[in-house]
Amino acid sequence: MKTRIGFGYDVHQLVADRELWLCGVKLQHEKGLLGHSDADVALHALCDALLGAAALGDIGKHFPPSDNRYKGIDSKILLARCVAMIRESGYEIGNVDMTICAERPKINPHIAEMRECVARVMQIPQEDVSIKATTTEKLGFTGREEGISAYAVALIERR
């Protein structure tokens, strides 16, 4: 059985008058993430990890911000399409692991709901989805609450 690992990273700026979506869950916060889609930074990092594991490029290749079909799109749709591409390429998902970097809002109270959402969209067991959160101890753009970043790894295996 061939096993492959992919890594993804994404960052989006926090701005007023936007909803905050992380791992497919809407969080209450005075700011949201700026982007062409719903700007779910965690799901974007996960999409890149999955696509990278299968050597299929990145999220921008498949869903370019210059294409108005993706304006405001729910990132759960993008994730479901990436999962379909992985499976069409002859792979199955082993597990995924994500880390969200944000000073506020607190992410930990939402992790169970986020894991359930990601597992449902990916059609994998919830035990194969890990989501963690951290701050940057008030350092950098994340520490100044100018944005949120996310890292993701994905393990895929040839069927």
Image (cartoon, grey):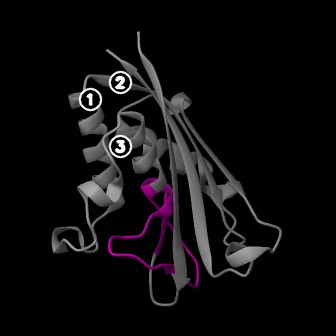
Name the residue tied to disc 3. Answer: 121
Element type where label 3 sits in the image: helix
Name the residue tied to disc 1. Answer: 87
Question: Residue 36 appears in which quarter of the rendering?
Answer: bottom left
Is residue 5 shown above or below 41?
Answer: above
Badge 3: residue crowd in 10 Å (few <14, some 14–19, many ≥20): some
> Three-letter amino acid code at disc 3?
Val
* Distance from the alpha carbon under mark 1 to that under mark 2: 6 Å
Name the residue tied to disc 2. Answer: 92
> Three-letter amino acid code at disc 1?
Arg
Badge 2: residue crowd in 10 Å (few <14, some 14–19, many ≥20): some
Is residue 32 shown above or below 21?
Answer: below
Badge 1: residue crowd in 10 Å (few <14, some 14–19, many ≥20): some
* Distance from the alpha carbon under mark 1 to that under mark 3: 14 Å
* Residue 74 appears left or right of 107: left
Region in magenta: 20-44
Residue extending farthest right: 137
Is residue 135 covered in magenta?
no
